[in-house]
Image (cartoon, helix red, strand yellow):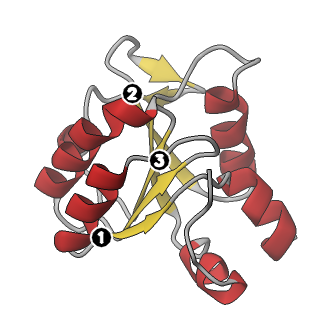
Amino acid sequence: MDTDKHSASEIQRVLQFKNIAVVGMSKNEGKPAHFVPKYLIDHGYNVIPVNPTVNEILGRKSYPAVSEIPEDVDVVDVFRRSEDVPSVIDDAIRKKGIKVIWMQSGIYNEEAEKKAKENGIEVIFNRCMMVEHRQYLQ
């Protein structure tokens, strides 16, 4: 699977956004969906868990959907199977104000990318926010 065509400077620009909703965030410390958001928190990001099966992760309130988050969200970081991404995009579009959909490593859905872009949302895919942050901002 390829990655998107963002340049280093474009990735660095996106990494400046600080309000990150993490869809599929996990309580399981061994999963990337737990340790990547924890890394982001440790590096100054406002991470908002989105997981309908838990009330709280890492001491932060978890929401059942992005559209139910009361505060502003800049980036939706997706830790869900590729086939589940279209419903995440639909929900993100309802939220309004989302700037970027970031599909983590190994995740991509062409239909979801197209719909997000049609709604003015930038799309990054098959990249890890933690890896990119380490590469460009440390």
Q: Mark 3 points at which residue?
A: 108
Marks 1 and 2, how far apart at CA: 23 Å
Sort mark 1 into few (<14), some (14-19) or many (20+) by Cα contacts within 10 Å.
many
The amino acid sitting under disc 3 is Tyr
**What residue appears at the point 46 percent right and 20 percent down from the top-left corner?**
56
Earlier along the polypeptide chain: callout 1 or callout 2? Answer: 2
The amino acid at mark 1 is: Ile
Going from the N terminus, do you reach mark 1 or mark 3 first?
3
Asked if labels 2 and 3 touch by Cβ distance under 8 angstroms, the answer is: no
Cα–Cα span, label 3 and label 2: 24 Å
Q: Distance between the residues labelled 1 and 3?
A: 15 Å
| Circles 1 and 2 in contact, beta carbons < 8 Å | no
Which residue does the image show at 80% across and 73% down from the upper left? 137
- Residue closest to the far left: 94
Q: In this view, does 78 lie above or below 54?
A: below
The disc placed on residue 48 is none
Residue highlighted by disc 1: 121
Q: Is mark 1 on a helix, strand or loop?
A: loop
Q: Which residue lies furthest to the bottom in this view?
A: 9
| Percent coordinates x, y for residue 14 in the rendering | 55, 75
Q: Quadrant of residue 93?
A: bottom left
Residue 87: image location, x then y, percent? 22, 37
